[in-house]
Image (cartoon, rainbow, N blue to C red):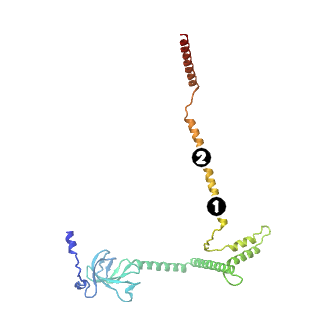
Amino acid sequence: MGERKVVAKYIPPDFDPSLVPRGKKLSAKDGTVPVRMMLPFSIQCSNCHTFLYKGRKFNSKKEPMGGPDGVYLGITRFRFYIKCTHCARPVTFLTDPKNADYEMESGGTRNFEYTKDKQEQEANAEEEEEEKKKLDPLAALESRVLDSQREMAEIDQLEEIRALNAKHLNLLKPENGNFGDETQAVLNAVHSSEKDNVDPNKESLELTAEEEELLRSVKFGKQENKLRRLDERDEKLAEEKRKKELERIRQNAAVNQQKKSVINVVARKRKAPSVDSENVEQVKRKDEGLSSLLTGYGSESDSD
């Protein structure tokens, strides 16, 4: 079966798809498209008051909504047509891409609508708060006090920000009017602040001439890497450093060699057999016995 299906899908090289006749359109004469769908929400028919529950399957018809409200942010809105299962009354509803939901149009009423219920709840909550403020003068006074405190806090924060910005501008403003010498401006501000806050009991915190020179020499930002050619002095220093390193390596090698020789001598002494005093005496006795036998044998031979 598999091979037969593969062979049946052969397309000849001279195939021209433009010569193939087009099939019939699925849309009806009125421009609608038949769609098999489930009801996205529960509906009560406005004619026979029959309930059509969510999830029920219908053979509906779909068409673009059209008009100025037919497109939302480039998304086309569609209209669906169904019929009541009891009285066959047409019921229409629309897609709602703004709220990711559907909108009831005609032929029935929706039992539950999330977006409208939410808006109604928010409106009711606002109305209740306003009524409470009107009926309760203490609550109204408290709300006004809180609003005034919030406004005062915001004004204070804004004033602080403005003062800080003005201070920064005055701090970085050079004498000649050209921005760019921020270091000198900072030094001037430091000197002025130290003069204003002088305490005779404490030591002076003024910058010395060397510190000011060091501060001026600092360049903030990315520094370019400058290459420098080595001269004879640099080569001599490198050669001396290399000789010292070589001498240090030789000294370390000599010390290691001495340590190894000492370790070998100690190891040899530990491997040599130990001679006890008893063994020495036995060896001496054997030597004396042998010497007496030899002397006796020599005297007998001489007498003969």
**CA distance for labels 1 and 2:** 27 Å
Mark 1 belongs to which amino acid? Glu
User: Residue 159, position in %: x, y?
Assistant: 65, 80
Image quadrant in which you'd find residue 150: bottom right
Residue shown at 57% from the left, 24% from the top: 278
Q: Which residue is mark 2?
A: 257
Q: Secondary structure at mark 2?
A: helix
User: Residue 28, position in %: x, y?
Assistant: 25, 86
Residue shown at 49% from the left, 79% from the top: 126
Q: Do we see residue 206 in this rendering?
A: no
Residue shown at 47% from the left, 78% from the top: 122
Q: Do we see residue 294 in this rendering?
A: yes
Q: Secondary structure at mark 1?
A: helix
Nearer to me, 234 or 133 = 234
Mark 2 belongs to which amino acid? Gln
User: Residue 259, position in %: x, y?
Assistant: 60, 44
Q: Relative to 39, is 245 on the left or the right?
A: right
Q: Relative to 6, is 128 on the left or the right?
A: right
Q: Which residue is mark 1?
A: 239
Quadrant in which the N terminus appears: bottom left
Which one is earlier in the sequence, the residue at label 1 or at label 2?
1
Q: Residues within 10 Å of mark 2 (few under 14, many from 20)?
A: few
Residue shown at 25% from the left, 83% from the top: 17
Residue 276, placed above or below residue 300: below
CB under 8 Å between callouts 1 and 2? no
